[in-house]
Amino acid sequence: MIVVALVVAAAGLVLAHRAYRTAEIALSGLLLDALSTDGVEVVAARQTVYFGLGSDTPLGLRMTPECTSAFLVLPLLVVGAVMIALRPRITRRVLFALAVAAVAVVVVNQFRVLTLVGLVEWLGVDTGYYWGHTLLGSMVSVFGGAAALVAFVWLATRK
């Protein structure tokens, strides 16, 4: 039953990726609003958060399918389902590991967005966006995703 639920969740994540991205960018908007002195607005229909409203350099960040944490959570769901199907006695460990890793991936993605915004505000739109999106943001995603994967495997397989 749990295996089916995880597979359904994985399929749902693919089919409802737009709703997931909307929720993820709304979370980014809340974080930016709490941390920023300039205006922040989320346009859910576009999966976009606008920040710096009221400054000389407002900018909108759109959560595209390749920028969402959904596709880092997706393999965790599938691997978790396979692990439980093969070894039902480790179900609790796998579900706990899955929860920890999924939260970690979402937090890392939010940190990536905040890093991008911080660099845009510090270095300006052109340079800040380049460094934040192309280099530093990618490094945050890769290292954070790897750490979440290691945590998942370690938590799911330890005795």
Image (spheres, grey):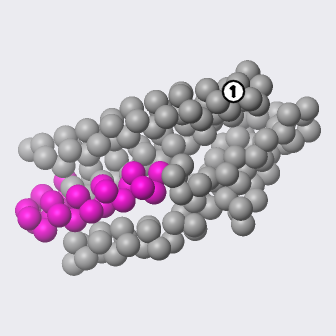
Give yes or no for residue 88 being in the magenta stretch. yes
Q: Give the image location of residue 73, x and y in percent.
A: 38, 55
Magenta residues? 69-93
Tell me residue 85's x, y (percent).
13, 68
The residue under the point 20% across, 44% down is 153
Q: Can see residue 30?
A: no
Instruction: Let me know if residue 125 appears in the view.
Output: yes
- Taking depth in this image into account, of 132 and 33 the one nearest to the observer is 132
Residue underneath mark 1: 128
In the rendered image of this protein, does residue 123 appear above or below residue 146?
A: above
Residue in view at x 30 percent, y 55 percent: 76
Q: Position of residue 20 (x, y in %)?
A: 54, 63
Judged from the image, the secondary structure of the residue bearing numbered disc 1 is helix
With 140 as the anchor, is 53 left or right in this view? right
Name the one closer to the observer, 68 or 54: 68
Q: Is residue 84 magenta?
A: yes
Q: Quadrant of residue 36?
A: top right
Identify the image quadrant of the C terminus.
top left
Residue type of the residue flagged with mark 1: Gly
On screen, residue 74 versus residue 47, left or right, reads left
Location of residue 42 in the rendering, given as x and y in whole percent from the top left corner:
75, 55
Q: Predominant secondary structure in magenta?
A: helix
- For residue 12, above or below residue 27: below
* 13 lies left or right of 41: left
Q: Residue at x 64, y 30 (%)?
A: 130
- Residue 98: image quadrant is bottom left
Figure quadrant of the N terminus: bottom left
